[in-house]
Amino acid sequence: MLFMFGDLVAEMDVNGKDDLKIPLLQPSDAVVLDIKSVRSVDQGVRTIMFKIGGIECASCSTSIESVLQDLRGVESAEVSPLQGQAVVKYVPELVGVKAIKETVEDAGFEVTEFTEQDIAVCRLRIKGMACTSCSESVERALLMVEGVKKAVVGLALEEAKINYDPNVINTDRIIEAVEDAGFGADLIGSGNDGNKVHIKIEGITSPEDMTAVKCSLESLAGVNHVEIDMEECKVAVSYDPDLTGPRSLIFFIQEAGAGSTHYQASLYIPERRHKIEKDHEIKTYRSQFLWSCLFSLPLLLFSMVLPMIPPYGNWLSYKLYNMLTVGMLLRWILCTPVQFIIGKRFYVGSYHALRRKSANMDVLVALGTNAAYFYSVYTVIKASVSDGFEGQDFFETSTMLISFILLGKYLESIAKGKTSDALAKLTDLAPDTACLLTMGDDKNVISETEISTQLIQRNDILKIFPGSKFPVDGIVIDGNGYVNESMITGEAIPIAKSPGDKVIGGTVNENGCLLIKATHIGSETALSQIVQIVEAAQLARAPVQKLADRISRFFVPAVVAAAVVTWLAWFIPGAAGLYPKSWIPEAMDEFELALQFGISVLVVACPCALGLATPTAVMVSTGKGATEGVLIKGGNALEKAHKVNTIVFDKTGTLTVGKPEVVSVVLLSEIPMEEFCYMVIAVEANSEHPIAKAVVEHSKNRLPDHKSQIGNGSAVKDFEVHPGAGVGCKVGDRTVLVGNKKLMRLSNVPVDTEVENYFSDNEKLARTCVLVAIDGKVAGAFAVTDPVKPEAAQVISFLRSMSINSIMVTGDNWSTATAIAKEVGIENVFAEIDPLGKADRIKDLQARGKIVAMVGDGINDSPALVAANVGMAIGAGTDVAIEAADIVLIKSNLEDVITAIDLSRKTISRVHLNYVWALGYNILGMPIAAGALFPFTGIRLPPWLAGALMAASSISVVCSSLLLQTYKKPFTYSK
């Protein structure tokens, strides 16, 4: 009996497209211009859709199709004479979209809403960025490239997202542009990497074999793109999971050999480049720091320690030639490798920065260390040619400065790596292997095979043992158990699962053996969608970041100018005798003292801390939010959310559970109950509204043997949705309307006293009444109740304590809406509002100076979610609502509204604190480095100590952001 579920499998043939996907909400006359640059079954073919004006009859559309099909490179062309929409499949290597447009216009028709280029997206890993100036330089370099439409560079994430026209430029040229700007770049992924598998092939004997394999794969249905590595005999295949899968591709390669040629193909899992590169960066900084210590510690010993301990340091004063001593020569020898070999990275960074007419931290370090080093070289040369010269070298300043900066970079890279820990933990949730079942025709299990998770294909049947993780999203087809979804939703209590229930990849099967059917794989799983949203959020730049961007443009030039002024301010008065000679330390002169102050000013200023203040805080908070079940789509959403003072709640599915139940049904005409139920099912079966589903379910249960077919073969036609009112259609030759009183009024259906009384009695009980009219007369009514979420009242009360006003907006009737609002503690209610009306109410609130957040779950909420300052979508809601929102509440719990607002406030507060650290440090550090305290206290900041403080400022900002990882939710529902 365990495996006899064939009928159930057939019934649950889900298409795997519904959870956390991103379809766009568009009006019916809009052009679908995501330009479906989707490769079709034939490799290289793309599809574009656009509007054509002036089509008057079928012959017009035929003539347009004819001229388009005559174009070389156009595979097919279809034109709808009714909608005026054209669908053209073409090969971009042979014909461009501009030529297609001009061909239609030359035929005498107008082309509207047409995009002249395809837009592709790629992500790059950027190496070598140190501060905001660097990230801005990369952006400018990318935007100057022809074909690049948009470029966003994240400093803390060390990534760039580029929108470009693939007909004009490719990823290789984009990487080249980044490298020309002086930074390293590696391709992370492109638009066709949604589902990608890496395969290693054995049996390849020549490049021709690899080319043959590539051509064979490109001809396979469902294959979008193929990349080959000739040296390693590897292929990377991007594919459409609806048409093929990784196991099918491996099998195809093995069968592709001809004659005596046989290939062996196996899954190849590439190493995580980001982690490898981050580890390599940390090791590089550590190695460079240790090497610098190898030279700088002896140099420090020779310059500052031994001379203070006679007679042990007397030998350092031994004169080799004229005034050139052993100590001078040793310090020069030890300093030079640190300055030019270990410190080479600062010269390279300075060169590229100055070449692109900008300046960064490398410029400051290079100027400061060069000033110290070359002045010291001058003193060595002067001492060797003069028998009376007495000067002091600053070789220890240069080496110690570089050593402390490398130490700071080493500690900073470790701290920055921890800012993405939450995202890494999410990525690691999915198991490496899964148990695949092979089913026979009788639906019995033939075999069980352990396979890599990356080999799972859509509609595979998988066996999940107790204690195991679900490898992908799916639907339970056999077995019962409890699943711990806390790692995805934050919900600690295990959820009961039975046949028909959905499961999420990465969650844990607590007990019971479950069989699931894979519905979402690869980039389509909820876990992958969450990771993608968080990655996009961490790349997006918050508006508060603009302060750092503005400062960074003039920061380094201003610091250089301040250093020169400082040097002159100490040197000229010293040379003129305007301050006492006693101020000048022993073995120094006025020039050397002024030079020390100038170098200290150069190296104490830190633009890096400013650049890291916002992105590190956003990275940590978005990652932390994801682990708490709150997906925040970027710094912009965070910044807007912390200002919210008014929250508008939808009712159904938001304040209420969203699973309405029919509690009573009444007939108000002579129609038999069975026929009445048939009519209702026929109409409401086409609606996705929760109340409609409840009505259909109740009507089915009232029919004999729970039948749901329409009697007498009646056909449903002319189905029409009346937003905020209901639906209507023709069932056979009868007109049926199902909806509220508003629909009855719009359709001129009379509502008598009996109906009004039924309405008022149920509305007092917070029930929604659904009227059914047949042929212009009310035939019956349903009373539906949707229980309020248990935490709703406490959440509204807590929001009030946060000085946030709550408002309810619903399409339901006033009586029901008022009763629900009273139950949860909301005073302001707008009822009987259609979807556009909800958006209008939000705009009215905004016009009164309110910062509004909208919380909703359905398609009808999407206009309001977009209109609000911050849109929050319930995770169990529709794809369109989730796409329209700025914040997604994964576990559909209202307490996460509080978490989202509170986390945003804590994050922006942390950003401001980071700016205080960064700006306050520079504001205090530069005057001290310039010698502001020296005349009064004798305290001055040596250049090597200034360099150490500069490194410490960046570390302090990153560590400050890391404290957000300790965030605790302010509110938890208690029964």
Image (cartoon, rainbow, N blue to C red):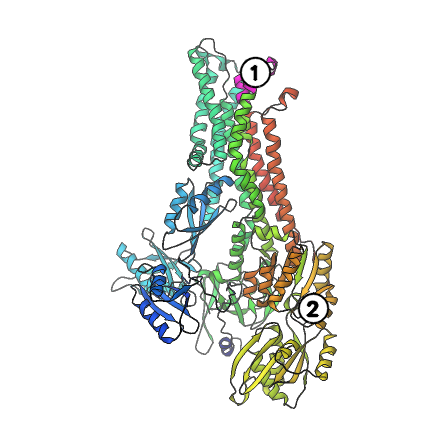
Of marks 2 and 1, the one in the foreground: 1
- Give the number of callouts: 2
Query: Relative to 779, is 448 on the left or the right?
Result: left
Q: Residues within 10 Å of mark 2 (few under 14, many from 20)?
A: many
Provide residue 569's location: percent of width, then percent of height.
Answer: 56, 21
Residue numbers of the magenta segment: 570-596
Chain-order first, disc 2 or disc 1: 1
Query: Relative to 475, is 799 on the left or the right?
Result: right
Query: Relative to 728, is 815 on the left or the right?
Result: right
Give the answer, above or below, for where 695 lies relative to 67. below
Q: Report the quarter where the C terminus lies.
A: bottom right
The type of residue carrying mark 2 is Val
Q: What element carries label 2?
A: loop
Q: Name the residue under label 2.
A: 788
Provide residue 287's location: percent of width, then percent of height.
Answer: 47, 35
Which of the pair 719/215 is nearer the observer?
719
The type of residue carrying mark 1 is Gly
Marks 2,1: beta carbons within 8 A: no
Observer able to see residue 875 = no
Provide residue 906's location: percent of width, then percent of height.
Answer: 65, 48
Q: Name the residue under label 1.
A: 574
Give the answer, above or below, for where 55 lies relative to 629. below
Which of the pair 251/387 is nearer the observer?
387
- Based on the displayed image, in which of its 4 quarters is residue 924 positioned? top right
The answer to if 601 sits in the magenta stretch is: no
- Based on the displayed image, in which of its 4 quarters is residue 942 positioned? top right
